Amino acid sequence: MKNVLFVLLILFCSQSIGQVGINTDTPAPDAALDIEGTDKGILIPRLDLSDLSTIAPVTGGATESLLVYNTNTTTGKGFYFWSGVEWVPVGKGLYWEKDGNTGTTPGTSTGENYLGTKDAQDLVIATNSAEVMRVTSNGQVLASNAGSAAAPTFSFHSDSDTGIYSEGTDKLNVSAAGNNMVEFDGGSNPQTILNPTNSDVDTRIASQGESHMLFVDAGTDRVGIANSNPQATLHVGGTTSTIRIDALNSTNNVNNKGSVSTPVFVDANGELSIQGSNVITQLVEDNTAFLSTPVIVDNTSSGRTITELYATTVTLTRDALIEVVYQAGVTITDTSNAFIYDGRPRIYRIFVEIDGRKVAYKGDAYTSRSTTGTTIVNGPFYLNGNGYVQLPGSTTGTTHEIKVFAEVYGNTASTRCSYGGNGDDIFQVLVRY
């Protein structure tokens, strides 16, 4: 009977005052329920919420803010409240969750969400209680580990030996497949180094029209320009490739003649230069088959007989001094091929015309007398000579005509000169720049 009266008294007080106190006679005036205790807690109803989208297993209603403790490990153990449409974990959306957040509003203004600090303090990211990264209050991102080529500091899940790291103070390195490919060294001698470990790792720079515009073959220590397989220390490829050195052009070098090609010289140190005082001699023709077939020249008149023996050309890409050199054997008889012993003099000559200009004139006289016709002097007699002429050239090439002539004068006597056919006849053309 006393217990019934006590319950009725509590109900009467709660209805008249609107507050309930447990273990206290003076519940807080702003609390509907005030529970006090020093060694006990409150057990909220424990339910198995297998489906967070339905009110079940709660029955009898679906009042918003209903609080329970979820024991289901699949949907997530913990305190949940009914939002009116689903069960929501207490605190969801207010903190960064281990499995990620939804419905965030990126930004740092009121009502927006971010990861970091609200005061001028660094943000530290750690693993196993050790700092691995720090975002400073002034915006720097600092890595605690310098990394290595095989395990770069900044890398990729699917390719962990490719990324960015540092080999030391003031150095930034890029690795690929565990190889140190590039190093930016900002030390006392700032430089960018490709293949800093001197490994057998080739370097290739491409252009729009050339896949190997610059190629370094690390295995052979060779460099190719427009060439993927250099065969020398420096190998320029391509059928129309050229090399230009501005220090050697006609504007910057007084020894460059401008309109015609100028020879380039290499000194003992391997340096290239143009030297106006130097002369280059080229043997552009060395004809040892000159007059391999004899040329017969007859003369029986009072005048001279002139016959062309040979013709050739030379093409010059710049002004040059031309020298012609010849040697030809001559056998002398009368026109019936009989020996001459009448004692009358004959003249035989060779001369060269270059573009119609006579040079290298060489001649000799012959006579023989014998009362019996048996004691005579006969050939072959050799004529050899040379001559010079300055000729113009051009960058597109200027061609000059060279002709060799024989001249025979028998002074009305029967005379035949056979030029060549001796095996020792030669004709040469030398060009001097």
Image (cartoon, rainbow, N blue to C red):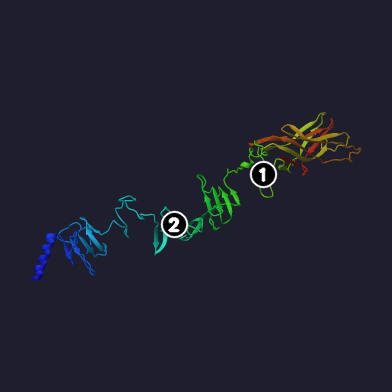
Quick check: 17 left or right of 228?
A: left
Q: Quadrant of residue 142?
A: bottom left
Q: Which mark is residue 243?
A: none
User: SS of the residue at dot 2?
Assistant: strand
Q: Position of residue 247 (x, y in %)?
A: 63, 42
Type of the residue with mark 1:
Ser
- Among all residues in the image, which is located at the extreme top? 302
Quick check: 72 left or right of 230?
A: left
Q: CA distance from mark 2 to mark 1?
A: 53 Å
Q: Position of residue 421 (x, y in %)?
A: 77, 42
Residue denoted by label 1: 273
Asked whether residue 158 appears in the rendered view, the answer is: no
Viewer-side residue, 227 vs 252: 252
Asked whether residue 101 appears in the rendered view, the answer is: yes
Q: Which mark is residue 142?
A: 2
Type of the residue with mark 2:
Leu
Residue sitting at 59 percent across and 55 percent down?
A: 221
